[in-house]
Image (cartoon, coloured by chain):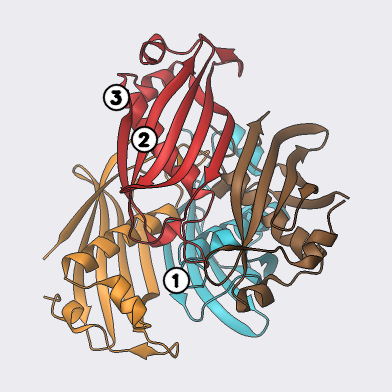
Chain colours: A brown, B red, C cyan, D orange
Amino acid sequence: MTHAFDLRVYYEDTDLAGIVYYANYLRFIERARTEWVRAQGVDQLALRAAGIVFAVRRIEADYLAPARFDDLLQVRTAPIATTAARIVLAQDVWRGDSHLFASRVTLVAIGPGGRAVRLPPMTASAAP
Amino acid sequence: MTHAFDLRVYYEDTDLAGIVYYANYLRFIERARTEWVRAQGVDQLALRAAGIVFAVRRIEADYLAPARFDDLLQVRTAPIATTAARIVLAQDVWRGDSHLFASRVTLVAIGPGGRAVRLPPMTASAAP
Amino acid sequence: MTHAFDLRVYYEDTDLAGIVYYANYLRFIERARTEWVRAQGVDQLALRAAGIVFAVRRIEADYLAPARFDDLLQVRTAPIATTAARIVLAQDVWRGDSHLFASRVTLVAIGPGGRAVRLPPMTASAAP
Amino acid sequence: MTHAFDLRVYYEDTDLAGIVYYANYLRFIERARTEWVRAQGVDQLALRAAGIVFAVRRIEADYLAPARFDDLLQVRTAPIATTAARIVLAQDVWRGDSHLFASRVTLVAIGPGGRAVRLPPMTASAAP
């Protein structure tokens, strides 16, 4: 199931080319991942207290069309592959009917020793 | 030929996990691209005056190991494929002998009408 | 009258001290100013088309208590002094009953020649 | 004595107005403070291991003229007042002979309990 997260483009997000700076799409989709994790019932702060954090291992991203100041964007997040150790999310940014940004993000869970641990069960159960 | 760009990790680059926030590697490699373009003899400000800007079309990135506050990092940039319309760069981040981040970045040149134009010849000639 | 703008703290906003990085409060209050300007009926994109932009001339800010990951914050914006040429806003950040950040921001309007121009009348009329 | 720190303006620093985004001057002067602290012989990482971090309590900043893409800037940092508990720095940004940004930054040291502690003696001895 696809999770939707809306956001507004502000001055901070743009660069002198008049469009959203390319690294900022990664900020946008990370906000959406945080809300997606919350929607799965996972408490990131409780995980952190247990020494577990999510980490991005890989990202593939296509910049299809630029977003601009004051645009209302929607980040759509959906798990596309899940194992005990990692999850791959599709995260796309849309402005109305325009598909601006497409990405595949591979996440792992890192435990207290800095090594990959099993993903929280609630996250795994969120996979299709 | 590989271009080297050194940088220091500051507070602004880190997040609460105590490591460099994942989007900030894209800021680091963009700084390195700017210096790489300059090293090719291309004047980005002159290009801009002519209505031409570089745009990232695609990025693939692997996060191999985290960078931390106060680290001295080196971004290594090398063209790996060039056509009239696009160039693919390998951009890697190292801390001493540790390979922290590996990416492939596809660039195009955008002209006054917002459409892709031929890359500046100097950039093309910089390819291997 | 005070304008309220709510926001969530994400990973991107924090630093290795585990709190919101000090420069990011300026991003937060700029988002709130954009919404405050919109609420006055001023169309920033139309102004930009006319070559007019708002610029910050001065800021005084006190950091009273830190904000943290996942906090829900509210930025409260109120004009406290207005002339034809400049406006001073009080912009404060709260988390529930906790006052985290207090600022005074002086804005001017910059015209096509890069010089200060009269503020848009709608903004002036929004002053108390 | 004034400490000088040079930096280049990159795409990430600009916004759609074609100039450096106002919050980013705080990033610039924080980089300079880190290098200023290092120049005093203070090891921020050792302090952190002891649970002590520097925190900004107040900032006053005047935006005098805009910086632009590709500018070479210099941040000049000098202590102007020091007590056991706090230090006030003057931090200014210059582009050649042009004074672009002037600030006064009040710093305190925060100990393990989250309360202000005495500043490291090396920092205090760095004051005029």
> B13 left or right of D43?
right
B86 versus A122 height, above or below: above
Q: Are marks 1 and 2 in contact (CB under 8 Å)?
A: no
Q: Are marks 2 and 3 in contact (CB under 8 Å)?
A: no
In this view, the residue in front, D110 or C3, is D110
Residue at 14% of width from left, 75% of height from top?
D126
**Classed neighbour count for the residue bearing mark 3: other residues with Cα under 10 Å, few (<14), some (14–19), many (≥20):** few
> D49 left or right of A48?
left
Front of the two marks 1 and 2: 2
- Quote the CA–CA distance across marks 1 and 2: 39 Å
Say whether disc 2 or disc 3 marks the residue closer to the N-terminus: 3
Tag 2 secondary structure: strand
Where does label 2 land, which residue?
B76
Tag 3 secondary structure: helix
Marks 2 and 3 belong to one chain: yes
**Residue type highlighted by circle 1:** Ala
Tag 1 secondary structure: strand
Where does label 1 land, which residue?
C61
Question: Which disc is residue B39 wearing?
Answer: 3
